[in-house]
Image: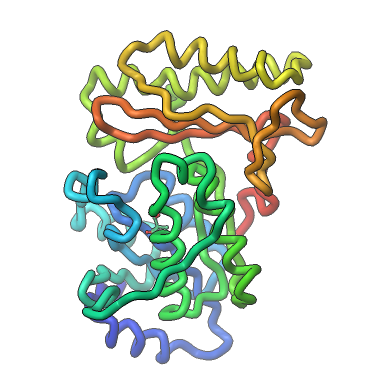
Amino acid sequence: MKVLQSLAEVKEWRCSLAPDESLGLVPTMGTLHAGHRSLLAAARTGCDRVALSIFVNPKQFAASEDLGAYPQHAEEDLESAAEEGVDLVWFTREEEMYPERFVTRVELLPLADRLCGKARPHHFGGVALVVLKLFNIFAPRRAYFGNKDFQQATIIERMVADLNLDIEIVRCPLVREPDGIALSSRNLNLSREGRRSALALSRGLFAAGELHAGGERDVSSLLLAASGVIRSEARVELEYLELVDPTSLEPFDQVVPDGGALLLVAAMLDGVRLIDNLFLGGGDGSRDEGSG
Ligand code: PAF
């Protein structure tokens, strides 16, 4: 496994691949958990070569957010990458990604200003920008994203379609701990008590899921079932809870259609921002569910 720091070396590595070798890219911010590892495993199965980028991208954080507190565990990440059979790890440097005089922006409204974008108006522009740069640098045949960040994966798919990028976006299922909590690098920043309280999010989603499985289609009833469980945990500050169309991310306001709906939640807990989602209707709502 090659571990590189400089952009020039990465480009050289990319050029050394044979034209018919397929490259799978897994862009991450590091602190790899089982969710990231499932992306690497999917890339390993689906492609001849696998590249992993690790970069805590400052452009997707506002000044008030947790950029400085974002966990970083480079050594453990290298172990995980080696175990997953990664060919190249790139520890991207900020000065190479965003050199002086960098001004370009990427905008994907209105997808980017709903849900998480309401509280984080700058966020998805920063994500799309860095992902587009990574796509240009690596020219992968496939890139892998988890449905835990459902809105992010939807936005990236949109960008790839809008800009005619010749890259297949492979969406992999959200991965949960055995007790139901969605895996996230930020979980490491929760106290033991906070970790327990965080379970309210998945339990709330599952409560709505059960109601939906029993035939309930009324949006208010489904949201109430979830919010009742989530709000019973006093430490959780609910940011949003919405039932949306998984493709347009537009909210349903009366009844959910037979095809199903995506229930998403975001909340703050002890200063840590957590997100989770559940597709009501079977599967996980993405078009390319878990393939690759
Ligand atoms: O999901 C993430 O870890 C990040 O948003 C990504 C896609 C690597 C862009 O920085």
On the image, the x and y values in percent for residue 49 come to 47, 74
The front one of 1 and 110 is 110
On the image, the x and y values in percent for residue 229 come to 49, 12
Up/down of 47 relative to 187, above or below:
below
- The quarter of the image holding the C terminus is bottom right
The front one of 121 and 3 is 121
> Residue 61 vs residue 240: left or right?
left
The image quarter containing residue 97 is: bottom left
Q: Quadrant of ligand 1?
A: bottom left
Figure disc tally: 0
The image quarter containing residue 66 is: top left
Up/down of 279 relative to 201, above or below:
below
The residue lying at 31 percent from left, 69 percent from top is 89
On the image, the x and y values in percent for residue 260 come to 74, 33
Colour mode of the rendering:
rainbow
The residue lying at 53 percent from left, 57 percent from top is 42
The front one of 199 and 116 is 116
On the image, the x and y values in percent for residue 135 come to 47, 74
The residue lying at 30 percent from left, 52 percent from top is 61
> Residue 137 vs residue 76: left or right?
right
> Residue 90 vs residue 105: left or right?
left
- The quarter of the image holding the N terminus is bottom left
> Residue 219 vs residue 87: left or right?
right
Up/down of 201 relative to 85, above or below:
above
The residue lying at 27 percent from left, 21 percent from top is 194
